[in-house]
Amino acid sequence: MVMSAKERKLSRLGSCKGSAVAGGCGGGGGSPAARGHRSAAASAAGPQRRLFAALFAFLCAGVVVIGGVHVIGGVDVLVPDAASFRPVLRTAWPSGTLNAISSDAGAQQAGGGADTVLPSVQIRHAVGFPDRVLLILKDGSSLPAPERFECLYSPANSSELRYRALLAVSLPDGSRLVHCPAEPSGMDISLSLSLSPPVAPLQWDRLVYTALVDTRDNSTVVFSKGMNLRPGRLGVASRYQCVFGRDLSKPKHVLTSPVISAAQEIFRCVTPARIRRYLRMSTDANSNGDTDDKPMLVSIRTKGQRDSTLPSIAEPEPLPRYNRHRRQKAHSMCVCTMLRNQARFLREWIIYHSHIGVERWFIYDNNSDDDIEQVLNTMDPSRYNITRHLWPWMKSQEAGFAHCALRARESCEWVGFIDIDEFLHFPGNQTLADILQNYSNRRRIGELRTACHSFGPSGRTKIPKKGVTTGYTCRLAAPERHKSIVRPDALNPSLINVVHHFHLKEGVRYVNIGQGVMLINHYKYQVWEVFKDKFSGRVATYVADWQDEENVGSRDRAPGLGTKPVEPEDWPRRFCEVYDTGLKDFVHKAFTDPDTGSLPW
């Protein structure tokens, strides 16, 4: 008789149930000998099962722990690898937090001497100048005082040289710079407190040193040394191209783009779409505390039979995003200045210009080693909106002003480019606000030019205790040159500027403001103690240093002084043709404390 599948299944289940008393179905059935054999085998396999179970539990726990860490670390971020332009998956663990932990641990030992090591201090770039080596540190590096560490020089096949750092500067925006003595030829450099390997300095005279990404027209503005373009004129843009990549020495791993304009030390080129995407993703990653160990760089390549690319440390930095829907900017009047060791005059300059209507200050610090940080810390941030920007690049004032104009463009309607010893003065009845209002609605006016009166020592031999505006009252009769207040939106895209005035867009013009309305008191020739400091160098690119035997008769020099920092016997009486107390009288009226007779600076 043939049984169906269902009957066979029921028969098996029945036989199992029937034999339950005899040892159960399957593993429990069979003869006593067979059951004993299986029981012994089961006893022998028990420890192996327990070992396997323990191992399995350990692996599961590891997966849970790793998963927990991953959750704490944050969401993974997709970051493009610029060398090959392929996305790379990188965890968004907040490296800034880890750096802070290591920095705090190192800071507790910072008094331990020059050999203290801080793991967070990492050298990103090194640049060799004639008188020093500049070390640019990775953002987040925590620096002790310069006397607590040393610069290390590593020559081949020789012992290590050690010198104390000249200057160490840190700013809240993440900028970290260390100035070391000039290195002997052919040596690499490092720091005693850093684990970074020695770095070979790049030479300043051939270098791309900074870059800004302009979102208005999707261009990158590149600042360089070594192209030797003529001042005040446009170069031939087609001779050059911009090069983007992590490693510019590998042509297959870079992107190139055409140069739109080339002038002086500034090149403007198209920003490739891949670079724009990379920068957006990098900005998001950096906001999460993640930073690139090998950042994106941009450089300038000269096209031709001998293609050459300038060495570069320039990491493209996005400008504030353009808001085309904004009707009014945050500030009507801002000021850009570049200074070096002028801290003792800074309070008077800021407080005075705040009173007459300046709302925002961009201070480009060209390697000051005086008390500028302490002075700025005394200025109430709720009253004085001041940004100090480190600008260590020598003889690059024009480039610095162009850089500042771009940074100020989105927030400032007008920007004045004046020095720390220059004070806007209004002899008539109009104020700064009146003058700006007169021209703000005239969009074809892009620059207001005002004459400068140069003041001399006014018979003094010592620095006036109440400030320059009340201390110097005798000047030359004729004005020297002019300075400018510009509308950043009206500047020519080339950003050409010479002696504090810019080239403007086509169809935009400047106006000269009459001396009876607005002028500048330029306290150019102060007491010798102050004036002699100018012999340390000039910041303007196309102006000869004081001690150079070049353009000795230029108006940029002191007439009759020559090229030696030796005080003439009649210095206190020089440059005195007209007594002018107009600004002094205004300052006493506006600022003198009626109870004490003192001035606020």
Image (cartoon, rainbow, N blue to C red):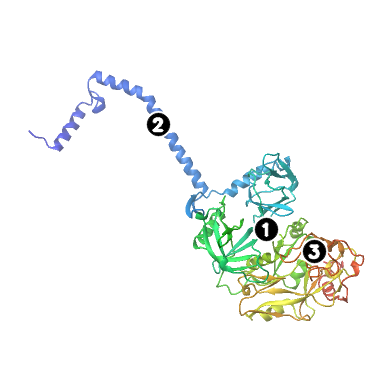
Q: Residue furthest right?
A: 569
> Relative to 256, is 185 above or below?
above
Viewer-closest of 12 and 293? 293
Viewer-closest of 9 and 563? 563
Frontmost of labels 2 and 3 is 3
Residue 594 seen in the figure: no
Q: Earlier in the sequence, mark 1 or mark 3?
A: 1
Name the residue at 16% across, 32% down. Answer: 11
Name the mark on residue 205.
Answer: 1
Q: Residue furthest front?
A: 305
Frontmost of labels 2 and 1 is 1
Marks 2/3: CA–CA distance: 88 Å
Q: Residue furthest top?
A: 33
Do labels 2 and 3 touch, CB within 8 Å?
no
Q: Position of residue 261 (x, y in %)?
A: 59, 69
Work out which quarter of the rendered image holds the C terminus and state it.
bottom right
Amino acid of disc 2: Ala
Secondary structure found at label 1: loop
Amino acid of disc 3: Glu
Q: As drawn, is 312 to the left or to the right of 381?
A: left
Marker count (numbered)? 3
Q: Position of residue 73 (x, y in %)?
A: 52, 47
Name the residue at 65% across, 65% down. Answer: 265
Q: Earlier in the sequence, mark 2 or mark 3?
A: 2
Marks 1/3: CA–CA distance: 21 Å
Secondary structure found at label 3: loop
Name the residue at 35% across, 24% down. Answer: 45
Residue count near mark 1 (Cα–Cα under 10 Å), binned few <14, some 14–19, many ≥20: some
The residue under label 2 is: 53
The residue under label 3 is: 549
Name the residue at 24% across, 26% down. Answer: 24
Viewer-closest of 600 and 176? 176
